[in-house]
């Protein structure tokens, strides 16, 4: 068996990988920008082209104070967002003044075959001028008609009226063997005042 090597003496000068070496890359498929938007919905570009899709949500700012950023999936091109989901949720936080810190499972934020929208943040996101949530949601092989639809999310928000750095981790599956072809994001109350969500396919 031969070993592939890079012949460049400096890693900084490498211009290409040797034969047989590969990596993953993100292909930007769509960008949606909120402006007092009730929802941000992705109803195209989610198909069998890629095995994994990623949504990167960036500085999502809520209109209403102390509310949640949520998502759901659709199997009918966005006519209904009601896929049954079973999920887990754990979170870590640290108060801005150093007075409180925490790491635990948050069983009140998960779903057990729930068809409602899944919360992606811990305590409610602030609507102060500098308040927002950022993170990602990964969905694996949404077009499969054999397997359930696994997903993973991690987010960071400045949350709660007492000013916390709040890191939230959500994982689970959409319990359907129908192809998921649309995803919607919204706040649990009020509009998404501002922010951007980018959809990527993973090569």
Image: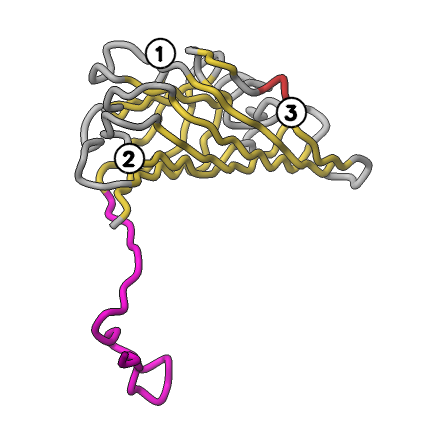
Does the segment drawn in magenta span residue 12? yes
For the stretch drawn in magenta, the main secondary structure is loop
Q: Is residue 201 above or below residue 36?
A: below
Mark 3 — residue?
106
Q: Where, by quadrant of the figure, is residue 149 drawn?
A: top left
Q: Which residues are magenta?
A: 1-28
Q: CA distance from mark 3 to mark 2?
A: 27 Å
What residue is rendered at 45% in x and 31% in y? 60
Is disc 3 placed on a helix, strand or loop? Answer: loop
Distance between mark 3 and mark 1 Cα atoms: 22 Å
Residue at the spot x=22%, y=31% of the render?
46
Q: Is residue 110 left or right of residue 35?
A: right
Measured from the top left, where is residue 184 in percent x and y?
33, 21
Q: Where residue 82 is drawn, which disc sits there?
A: 1
Query: Label 2, on which residue?
Result: 141
Dot 3 or dot 1: first in sequence order is: 1
Contact? badges 3 and 1 (CB < 8 Å): no
Disc 3 crowd, CA 10 A, few/some/many (<14, 14-19, 20+): some
Any magenta on residue 14? yes
Q: Nearer the viewer, mark 3 or mark 2?
A: 2
The first of marks 3 and 2 along the sequence is 3
Viewer-closest of 19 and 154: 19
Instruction: Between residue 4 and residue 95, name the one nearer to us.
Output: 4
The image quarter in which residue 141 lies: top left
Residue pushed farthest front?
1
Closer to the eye: label 1 or 2:
2
Q: Are marks 3 and 2 in contact (CB under 8 Å)?
A: no
């Amino acid at each position: 068996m031969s070993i592939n090597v890079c012949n460049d003496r400096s890693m900084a000068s490498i211009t290409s990988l040797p034969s047989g070496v590969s990596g993953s890359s993100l292909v930007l498929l769509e960008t949606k920008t909120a402006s007092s938007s009730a929802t941000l919905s992705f109803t195209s570009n989610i198909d069998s082209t890629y095995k994994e899709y990623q949504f990167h949500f960036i500085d999502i700012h809520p209109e209403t104070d102390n509310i949640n950023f949520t998502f759901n999936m659709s199997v009918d091109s966005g006519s209904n967002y009601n896929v049954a989901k079973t999920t887990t949720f754990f979170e870590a936080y640290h108060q801005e003044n150093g007075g409180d810190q925490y790491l635990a499972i948050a069983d009140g934020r998960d779903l057990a075959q729930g068809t409602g929208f899944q919360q992606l943040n811990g305590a409610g996101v602030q609507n102060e001028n500098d308040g927002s949530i950022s993170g990602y949601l990964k969905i694996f092989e949404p077009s499969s008609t054999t397997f359930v639809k696994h997903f993973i999310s991690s987010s960071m928000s400045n949350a709660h009226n007492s000013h916390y750095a709040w890191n939230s981790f959500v994982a689970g599956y959409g319990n359907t063997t129908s192809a998921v072809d649309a995803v919607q994001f919204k706040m649990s109350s009020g509009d998404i005042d501002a922010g951007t969500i980018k959809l990527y396919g993973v090569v």
